[in-house]
Amino acid sequence: MSVGIILMSRAPIPGQTKTRLQTHLTGKQCARLHKAFLQDLSQMLIEVSKLRNDINLYLTYTPKGKKDMFDSLVADDFHFFAQQGSNLGDKMYHALDYVAQKNEKQIILGSDLPTLQPSIILAAIKKLEEQDLVVGPAQDGGYYLLGTNKPVSFLFNDIIFGKNNVLQATIKEIRKHDLSYGLVDTWSDIDRYPELVSLYQELTVDSKWEVYPQATADLVTNLLETELEGGEVYGQQAK
């Protein structure tokens, strides 16, 4: 058995990535944050691959022709391929289908999960050994991870991505087609500024990290402590 794990990302181009954080950050700061996320998340996946000898790592990127932007961020352990499709659902299905040509199981996740830990990925793989699909619920009502034993296009046809009912709609479709599924722990992706503040708080609290997201911690601390010097940041007083 082999498991293909796909990291899905746009190139960290200032002004074109993490744009919903531009309410408080500049385009260049958002791009730097995206780079830090990629460094930490890709390193976490490399640690997963060290724990199992059946893991193949992939990064699917957009826009085409921008692979070089990932070279200093993501290790050579990853196989790269450009995203294909006109919308998020198409791109996800294509990526899963591409990786399914060489792997019996496929897992896809986004690039805004800097605190995700190896145990979550390992749990997802275990559930795929028992179920048809595995889903990682996101705190915003969507999902951050999807795993399949065989990609099924119906999961990506009628679901409106980016809305708060994506998870519910996905599970409804899975049940409708009489497929089994398992869930892994709920996680938070970092799309908006309040989530970034929560991330800052999480990173400054002692915890039993399996893999600590050091690049993210260094940058987020620098960005937010600068703001905290000016007063409150979403209810957190400067100290």
Image (spheres, rainbow, N blue to C red):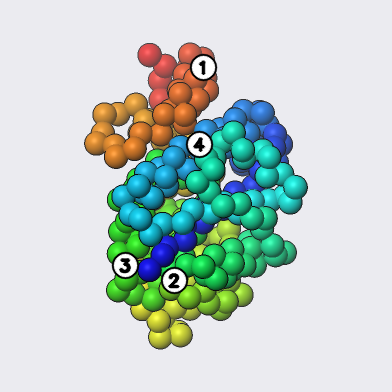
Count of number-bearing discs: 4
Q: Nearer the viewer, mark 4 or mark 2?
A: 2
Front-most of 134 and 29? 134
Q: Quadrant of the C terminus?
A: top left
Q: Quick check: 65 left or right of 5?
A: right
Q: Nearer the viewer, mark 1 or mark 4?
A: 4
Residue that mark 2 sits on: 104
Instruction: Name the N-terminal-most of marks 2 and 3.
Output: 2
Residue that mark 3 sits on: 127
Q: Which amino acid, by three-letter code, is at mark 1?
A: Thr
Which label was assigned to residue 39? Answer: 4
Q: Which amino acid, by three-letter code, is at mark 2?
A: Glu
* Residue 135 location (% of width, % of height): 41, 64
Q: Which residue is pictured at 46% across the width and 56% down the height?
A: 56
Q: Nearer the viewer, mark 3 or mark 1?
A: 3
Q: Which amino acid, by three-letter code, is at mark 4?
A: Gln
Q: Is residue 211 visible?
A: yes
